[in-house]
Image (cartoon, rainbow, N blue to C red):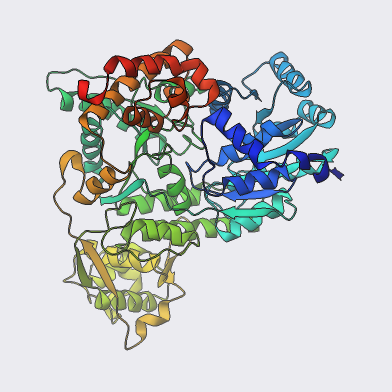
Amino acid sequence: MRRASPTRLSHMADTTAARGALRTYFGYDAFRPGQEGIVNAILDGRDVLGVMPTGAGKSVCYQIPAMLLPGVTVVVSPLISLMQDQVDALNDAGIPALFVNGTQTPDQQDLVLSMAANGQVKLLYVAPERLETQRFRNFASRTPISMVAVDEAHCVSQWGQDFRSSYLGIGEFIAGLPTRPTVAAFTATATERVRRDIIGILGLMNPQITVTGFDRTNLYFDILKLDTKEKAAWIARYVADHAAESGIVYCATRKETENLAASLNHSVPMLLDPTAAEGRVAVAYHGGMPSEVREQAQRDFVNDRVPVVVATNAFGMGIDKSNVRYVIHHNMPESIEAYYQEAGRAGRDGEASRCTLLWNESDIVTRRRLMDSDYENERLTPEEQEIVRQSKRRLLDGMVGYCRTTECLHDYMTRYFGEETAAHDGMCEGGCANCGRTFETVDATDVARAISMCVHDVNQKVGMGKIVKILRGSKAQDLAVWHPETMPTYGRLKDVPEARVRDVLNQMVADGFLHISEGRMPIVCFGARAAETVQPDFRYEMKRVARRPAGRRGESQAQARMLSQSGGETASPAQEEMFGKLRELRLAIAREIGKPPYIVFSDKTLHDMARIRPTTAEQMLEISGVGEVKMKRYGERFLEAIRAMGKPGEL
């Protein structure tokens, strides 16, 4: 197979042209960190792998080259439901883009492919399954394809948290093209091992690898350990206190999404107004819903008709809604990768946003049960499936460690992805609940040593529940077969609360001293660090958070400080009033054109308008996010609104 000649495309590798396209279509004067190098590499005909956090602008890295290269760029995107929003946003910016997927009739698909083949489309979005159809392969064999861009590329790796077997066919599709295009792969979540998988399975040739850093400094991270029965009330209060903001609440199961959405629709209106009846505050979203119901729920949320979506992880991969101000996890996710990606859907516009994880011990049990019952894949052998299960177990251990850690939550995540960060003194740059908070250090050495000895006494053959019972001297009938009274550790921790023993045991798993086996009956085994527990100098400390009283709207003092500092100076009352007026105008325009409000302008762009108060077209074009096409479409109406409110001193 011939490869597209770099010399044929070299005249397009022009930084000035790329920056000009960025200004024209997106209204930005400069690329974000990492973007320009990726764009130039693509224009030079080189494969790339971009690992960039959500909100860092991965899509711009292939959208700008697509406008400058000849032919069409095929964008492989995992969720059909998102393609319409992505294409709408590009068309609104003046970029000709279309999608082809199973929601269209064969005639509609043929029309789109015909337009792409005739040069009327620069970006063509498809799901990975589409690449295997004869209709699309016929199209690809006769159409000049300059680039294949693979979004959410971590889905190709069985070591990642979101493996999709359909992604395994992308490399084969590329290899079958008559002329090999440039291949660009992008993801927000990829450890070193997953990166190697992406390069190998997609067949990237000597790719330029760009890792821009994983920290999202505009996000405030918090962890709350709550009993299951307390979670709904906490979420309802938070939603009521942030009624003007958009948020996503993630749940582990489909049933929980529906129950919680119904609960919010009942309780939140009454929290806002005790005389109010039930109202429509939240919609549920999960894979078991009829497609039309699911798509309507997403549309209502994206178009700001409802402020909250309560969803399983089926919702949100690559979602473009930029003004999500908070993401709450009702349950602990299965991995740091999953949490980073889901929480990262907050604050894509760079504005300060909050990510809160609610968890308890039963979440760990639920995750292990789901993991053990949900792994069948026809493309993998039983042995490979077992390897994937073990990998999933390790990913879960990392998530448990996040829930229990008392170090900086930003540092924990960035280090997990292999990025070393500087130590913080009291308050991290982005803000998290752990930094600046008081901790009580508890010596858990004796409890940890007793647990390790008990695992030895039972020859690593029982589960967590029985370990706890033996240590606390239980006389339960299900222990009789083990003759626990003959064990040195029987009753060793009879004066230690059961919850405390479980806490220490779970933390020992997260820290590698113990390991929980696979299967319906998980067994507690020794981990890689088990031998340390018998050393004379072994010390094991656990820290307990002494939570400060919640401030306004449930925010801690640390979070309030981060939120006020994230955009530089705090907005004045006049600026807040102006922002509100511009937000109302944006919503009205969005309703007129039938598009989501964020497609018109982002919150960040509106905040800049409220602060700078442009009164001419030239001044408006200086606002970040106002490109030439959007200026022609919407600029004058926003200028009229700004002029009508007058200067700050005239308000």
Taking 497 as reference, is 445 left or right?
right
Residue 350: image quadrant is top left
**Quadrant (top left, top right, bottom left, bottom right) of the C terminus:** top left
Residue 604: percent from left, percent from top: 39, 33
Where does residue 157 sit, x and y in percent of width and height?
62, 51
* Residue 544 visible in the picture: yes
Question: In the displayed structure, does residue 484 sit left or right of residue 170?
Answer: left
Q: Residue pushed farthest top?
A: 592
In the picture shown, does residue 647 fall above or below 39? Answer: above
Along the horizontal axis of the image, is 296 left or right of 563?
right
Q: Quadrant of the N terminus?
A: top right
Q: Is residue 516 left or right of residue 114?
A: left
Q: Quadrant of residue 19?
A: top right
Residue 401 falls in which quadrant of the image? bottom left
Q: Which residue appears at 25% of the width and 78% of the height?
A: 446
Q: Farthest residue toward the bottom?
A: 536
Q: Residue at x 30, y 53 (%)?
A: 432
Residue 205 drawn at (x, y percent): 75, 53
In the displayed structure, 125 sits above or below 346; it is above
Residue 306, horizontal then vertical, whole percent: 34, 22
Image point (47%, 35%), residue name: 316
Q: How many marks?
A: 0
Residue 94 vs 386, above or below: the answer is above
